[in-house]
């Protein structure tokens, strides 16, 4: 499984994740009321406990001494004490827990300020993570996860993700706030590498944000932003203190402006952890704002056109409250739906019962190996149910198969919501239809004939 470890230390660190107090929390009831099944206040979420004591380190050492630096970790089975109680498909939704910033960016009339607010939105989610070094569960092929949010503006946001490839692991996702004309499509591709005392997840995915009601005069199409992900490093896996670092670059490109944010990993001699730095520029190279601070603390911006400008707070991780997604109750979920699929594993992790966690995880992965072998024997390929392969020249390799009607009027918004809810059950009480199980490319072909 791709090593996508998570961090420790006091400030909550990390990547695509949102922490609920157990695998079961956050079930929606009725009209979207959220029932948080919180553990009693005296208990600590196991996602926040580093279990890498001497015994743990010797287990890791046993695995790692057999590896060569630079090798691919995705086929190595790692001990369960470094696993978060959440699948990568759910973890990605951590990036979507500040919808208010996104809605504010969309409402901004000034192009440059709109870009700065998109930068703020995209930088806001990286700190949502377990406090310990934990990696999300590596989704199985065809695993899927859906969720929704009841937004403060009385609208709803919808999220659908599916594991579209296993080697290499690829998680495809779709997010939309129909009534605000906001859509995000993306893929997360963590390529894991062993580097000695650290492991890396080289994040090769891309997110594409569109404001469907703002037309880019250059293309005549909706305004589009592409966003890349920083790489993740788990340091100190053999000796020293374990911690997560985000490193390398995060690049955001819009129609007029772009930013390359450097995530600085701490040097051996000096320096600090978790610092970021970038300049908002146009495509002629003119500089507008400097972004600085720390991705898990306070992020600052400063106007470079004004010599007397001081840096101001862009985003403060400590004073901002993420809005967690609402997920249908377990009894309504399908067999390959993330929380139901991994429930025995996450329940065992919550009890720190690593014998059961390892056993249950093996059962799930072994069943997948048997299915993969059978596909080879039968000469059939795996096809995702919810995402289709894209056309040449597209930004992403997979998109949601469903045609979401274009338009920005309220009737179209109703049609869009209906289309999204036809893809898969998202809202409590929704039922699976026979159509759900048909491969996405076939559903897409049928739909194209109907539309033409």
Image (cartoon, rainbow, N blue to C red):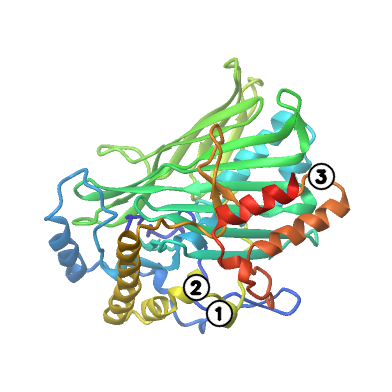
Which residue is denoted by mark 3 in the rendering? 407
Residue pictured at 56% horizontal, 63% vertical: 438
Counting residues from the N terminus, which is met first, the one under dot 3 or under dot 1? 1
Bin the neighbour count of mark 2 within 10 Å (Cα to Cα): few under 14, some 14-19, many 20 and up. many
Q: Is residue 371 above or below residue 440?
A: below
Q: Decide: marks 3, 1 in contact (CB < 8 A)?
A: no
Residue 73 seen in this snapshot: yes
Residue pictured at 49% horizontal, 69% vertical: 338
Q: Decide: marks 1, 2 in contact (CB < 8 A)?
A: yes
The number of callouts visible is 3
Give the foreground label among 3 and 1: 3
Which quadrant of the rendered structure holds the N terminus? bottom left
Which residue is denoted by mark 1 in the rendering? 330
Secondary element type, mark 3:
loop
Q: Decide: marks 3, 2 in contact (CB < 8 A)?
A: no
Report the front residue among 159 and 263.
Answer: 159
Residue 17 seen in this snapshot: no
Residue pictured at 68% horizontal, 71% vertical: 427
Q: Is residue 320 above or below residue 260?
A: below
Residue pictured at 52% horizontal, 71% vertical: 20
Secondary element type, mark 2:
helix
* Quarter location, residue 291: top right
- Distance from the alpha carbon under mark 3 to that under mark 1: 35 Å
Q: Most extreme residue toward the top, as rendered?
A: 284
Counting residues from the N terminus, which is met first, the one under dot 1 or under dot 2? 1
Which quadrant of the rendered structure holds the C terminus? top right
- Distance from the alpha carbon under mark 1 to that under mark 2: 7 Å
The mark found on residue 126 in the picture is none
Report the front residue among 410 and 279.
Answer: 410
């Amino acid at each position: 499984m791709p090593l996508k470890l998570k961090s420790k230390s006091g400030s909550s660190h990390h990547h695509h994740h949102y922490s609920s107090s157990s695998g079961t929390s956050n079930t929606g009831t009725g009209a979207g009321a959220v029932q948080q099944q919180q553990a009693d206040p005296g208990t600590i979420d196991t996602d926040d406990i580093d279990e890498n004591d001497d015994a743990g380190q010797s287990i890791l050492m046993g695995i790692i001494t057999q590896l060569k630096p630079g090798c691919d970790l995705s086929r190595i089975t790692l001990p369960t004490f470094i696993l978060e109680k959440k699948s990568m498909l759910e973890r990605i939704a951590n990036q979507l827990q500040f919808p208010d910033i996104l809605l504010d960016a969309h409402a901004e009339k000034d192009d440059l300020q709109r870009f700065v607010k998109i930068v703020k939105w995209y930088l806001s989610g990286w700190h949502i993570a377990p406090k310990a070094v934990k990696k999300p569960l590596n989704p199985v092929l065809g695993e899927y996860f859906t969720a929704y949010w009841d937004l403060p503006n009385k609208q709803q946001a919808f999220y659908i993700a599916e594991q579209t490839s296993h080697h290499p692991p690829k998680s495809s996702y779709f997010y939309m706030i129909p009534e605000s004309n906001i859509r995000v499509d993306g893929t997360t591709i963590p390529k894991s590498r062993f580097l000695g005392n650290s492991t890396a997840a080289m994040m090769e995915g891309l997110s594409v944000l569109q404001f469907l009601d703002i037309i880019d005069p250059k293309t005549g199409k909706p305004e589009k932003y592409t966003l890349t992900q920083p790489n993740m490093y788990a340091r100190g896996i053999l000796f020293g203190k374990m911690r997560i670092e985000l490193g390398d670059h995060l690049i955001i490109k819009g129609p007029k402006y772009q930013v390359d944010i450097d995530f600085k990993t701490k040097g051996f001699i000096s320096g600090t952890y978790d610092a970021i730095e970038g300049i908002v520029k146009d495509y002629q190279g003119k500089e507008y704002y400097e972004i600085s601070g720390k991705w898990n603390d306070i992020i600052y911006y400063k106007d470079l056109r004004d010599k007397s400008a001081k840096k101001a707070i862009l985003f403060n991780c400590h004073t901002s409250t993420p809005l967690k997604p609402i997920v249908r109750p377990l009894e309504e979920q399908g067999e390959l739906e993330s929380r139901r699929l991994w429930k025995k594993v996450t329940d065992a992790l919550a009890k720190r019962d690593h014998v059961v966690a390892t056993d249950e995880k093996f059962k799930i992965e072994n069943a997948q190996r048997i299915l993969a072998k059978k596909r080879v024997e039968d000469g059939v390929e795996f096809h995702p149910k919810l995402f289709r392969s894209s056309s040449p020249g597209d930004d992403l390799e997979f998109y949601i198969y469903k045609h979401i009607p274009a338009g920005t009027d309220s009737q179209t918004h109703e049609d869009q919501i209906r289309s999204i809810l036809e893809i898969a059950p998202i809202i409590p009480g929704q039922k699976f239809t026979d159509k759900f199980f048909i491969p996405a490319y076939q559903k897409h072909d049928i739909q194209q004939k109907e539309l033409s």
